Amino acid sequence: MTDLEAALRRAVRGEVGFDTTSRALTTMDASNYRRVPLGVVAPRDADDVAAVLEVCREHAVPVVARGGGTSIAGQATGTGVVLDFTRHMNRLVGIDPEARTAVVQPGLVLDRLQDAAAPHGLRFGPDPSTHSRCTLGGMIGNNSCGSHSVAWGTTADSVRELSVLTARGRRLRLGQEWAGAPEGLRELVDGELARLRTGFPDLPRRISGYALDALLPERGADVARSFCGSEGTLGVLTEAVVGLVESPRARALAVLGYADEAGAAEAAAGLLPLGPLTVEGMAVDLVPSTEGLPRGGAWLFVETGGDTEAEARARAEAVVRAADVVDALVVTDPGGQRTLWRIREDASGTATRMPDGSEAWPGWEDCAVPPARLGGYLRDFRRLLTAHELRGTPYGHFGDGCIHVRIDFDLLSADGVARFRRFSEELADVVVAHGGSLSGEHGDGQARAELLPRMYGAETVALFERAKAVWDPDDLLNPGMLVRPAPLDANLRFSVLPREPVDVEFGYPSDGGDFSAAVRRCVGVAKCRTTSVPGAGVMCPSYRATGEEAHSTRGRARLLHEMLAGELVTDGWRSTEVRDALDLCLSCKGCRSDCPVEVDMATYKAEFLHHHYEGRRRPAAHYAMGRLPVWLRWAARTRTAPVVNALASVRPLAAVAKRLGGIAGEREVPRLAGETFSRWWRKRGGRPTGGGDLVVLWPDTFTEHLSPSVGRAAVRVLEAAGLRVALPPTLRGPAVVGDGTSRSALALLSARRGQVCCGLTYVSTGQLDRARAVMRRTLDLMAPVLETSAPVVVLEPSCAAALRTDLPELLHDDPRAARLAARVLTFAEALERHAPDWNPPAVNLPAVGQTHCHQHAVLGDAADRRLRESAGLTGELSGGCCGLAGNFGFEAGHYEVSAACAEDQLLPAVREAPDGAVVLADGFSCRTQLEQLAGVRGRHLAEVLAERLE
């Protein structure tokens, strides 16, 4: 233990982390930069913060304050001690509806403040797109803005008082009329009044540099306001009093279509006199689909408010009349508005990929110019991109003249980094020529601070340095930011990654087969740190259960990044730090769809586990549950299911078996079916009947051995819809599709009996060699099916997802894998596509339950929604993950997290269900979790429909 660590542990009541994992999780924010800290401290209160500052001052170690870690300019990283305010100092201290103020701690997430203010008809004005995970401390440090800044300004406009600790331990209460000013600050300002009155651009989004002009006497000498945007370089915030604004009772959204982004930009300023709440812009190259949007190549999202929906709509329609548009749309439905806003909020992630899949990066994320000059600036910006052979997709706060953009810089080669520097220098000059600010929202950090002399001139920048010296004479707080900055092309986070592709098992088709590129996908947007998931969202259940960064998708990606870098995590695939972080990943695949950059942590986990245990003994659960299909087939062939069930019902025997198998003691072992689905099928005749389309029903492991009632129900419904149902062949060699076997003597002599399997349990436990062998065997069996046009209907969503994604990505060298993946349909998709004229039986009951996480992430549930609606099943299913997630919830040590995931959305939804509601759960894991934690029987949709066929 170092002297610094020991001293901090003696002085601080909060957590002190100098271990590899703690440091690795904070090497990066959402920027291009990476710095390795000495350690991380999670202070419990202001006294802890003071103790940290005292110890670090004695050891001459810098201190960096960090909130949600979503900063895009590098200011939330550092080489000293990082203060993590999100763990303890994250409370809403109080709210005063009459005064319209709130008292907050720096680690409070913005949405928690909004939730508390909403019942009073109030809200905090600024709302960055990261509102579900950014913190008030970070917003004050960056002077954040958001989409409603045309109405409610920046964070500085909402700050009333700030409690701050200086690096030398002074406790200050900052406010107006020089309240809390450190000694020497007033004298500094009094000597530079002329410069402060003339040297700062008059912009709604001037975030760059220190806001020293807020200290002018005619502006109230507001020390709190001048502190906003100082990026943790002047003092450490411990508490804030912030103002709230009245939230409109009703809102409408006018979506205005223009021919191109320049047209939209030029129109934006003209709409401001109408008093809109937002004027946001976005071009077509950032929108995954234009469905639901008016015609055009670019759009303005103009939100209006009112006391009633009619009043809000009237104001939105007035905006449409005043705007010269190609097409327009007014939306008053809150759900429709949320859908449209989600496109905008995810832009910071989706913009990191060009249409061809190549990478794009921040760096010039938020320049701002006077709104009236935005059109001209965008044209010059596009010309500069073309001159440097770069591409980017501008979007953002057109009403404030602030543009966000990710650019396809090559930050992996020396030539590419040199081009990044040249472009940055030239773009800074373009911004200044248009009277703009290098930063209009996210701060200067390392990305732009070096270029501040181009905006302010050398003398004003020297004034910034003098102001920093007044506040922090020892340069202890976040050095290298704003003043005396590090070069903008130093400390790039990509420089430590291997230059040659890493040898891996999956194909990573979206990343050119490069695992490093896959890991680079995580840019730190941190949507995985959202504690409440809107709608049917899934990501990230383990983070919501634990609140630990290491158990978020971003945290795991950071550890994988450091594993590849080899500086902090030095033992590569054998890393215990990475293993432990991945241990609580449920492999729910939620990040594959919910993460704006489509990080696929389930695949990365399987890849890691494969290499980590290669040539070594695995955990018992990998043998017990990873090879579940083997054990279940053995029980079926020996017809010992009744014996197994009887033994499992004897508690002492079951306890021993669970201990040996690495199964959580709290779990009940599911009962095996007395008759497998396939055996029932053969007894029934084993051949398709009827004259409709042929569909091949996949006998997945769970349906086959644990819940054959689902398979029997599916057969009844599919046949009632007029389809001919067959099972896959069980003999390799020449076979007849439709009878599940082959009757020819030649085939019986030359073929080997087998059973199809998607390989899911092997993939989820990282047994990729075995998974590959099982999948190839399956493809051999399915060869006759692939020669037909028959779809493959899979009832278990996790197995369907494995066939759609894991199969072609693991067997990327076998063209049959992609052909089979393309055939896979869910139960509802099969009915919709192959029996479009069939009407399901009327159920006419409310439905509750949960959309399976793999279905949400990989398969989609649009067909299921339509089928439920046709059957009269009303109500929305919840999002999230049930928490059992295949083998995860059964593994020893996972029970508490598994149960917490179920309590997040699924169990509350079931408890609140109306009388007579149908509990839907298409996944075996979901049904098992419901039964074991709530005593509720969930049913597959096929079972519900089959029951009503009578």
Image (cartoon, helix red, strand yellow):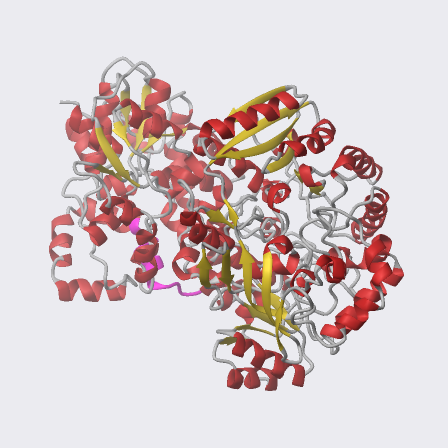
The image quadrant that residue 24 belongs to is: bottom right
Q: Residue furthest right?
A: 458
Q: Point out residue 182 in the picture as x, y percentages from the top left corner.
A: 70, 74
Residue at image point 28% right, 45% down: 909
Drawn side of residue 777 relative to residue 740, left or right:
right
Q: Is residue 618 magenta?
A: yes
| Left or right side of 912 for 400 | right
| Main SS class of the magenta portion in the image | loop
The residue that appears at 85% across and 37% down in the rendered structure is 387
Q: Quadrant of residue 637?
A: top left
Q: How many marks?
A: 0
Q: Is residue 590 left or right of residue 71?
A: left
Residue 72 point in image, percent of width and height: 66, 54
Image quarter of the N terminus? bottom right
Q: Is residue 169 left or right of residue 857?
A: right
Image quarter of the C terminus:
top left
Above or below residue 393? Residue 256 is above
Residue 914 x, y percent position in the rendering: 21, 39
Between 231 and 893, the one nearer to me in the picture? 231
One can see residue 487 in this view: yes
In the rendered image, residue 262, in percent from the top left (x then y), is placed at: 74, 29
The residue under the point 60% across, 86% down is: 3
Q: Which residues fall within the magenta stretch?
A: 614-628
Q: Camera-side residue: 96 or 598? A: 96
Depicted 835 relative to depicted 545: above or below: above
Say whether residue 135 is visible.
no
Using the image as rendered, state which of residue 298 and residue 516 is in the foreground.
298
In this rendering, the answer to whether 328 lies above or below 475 is: above
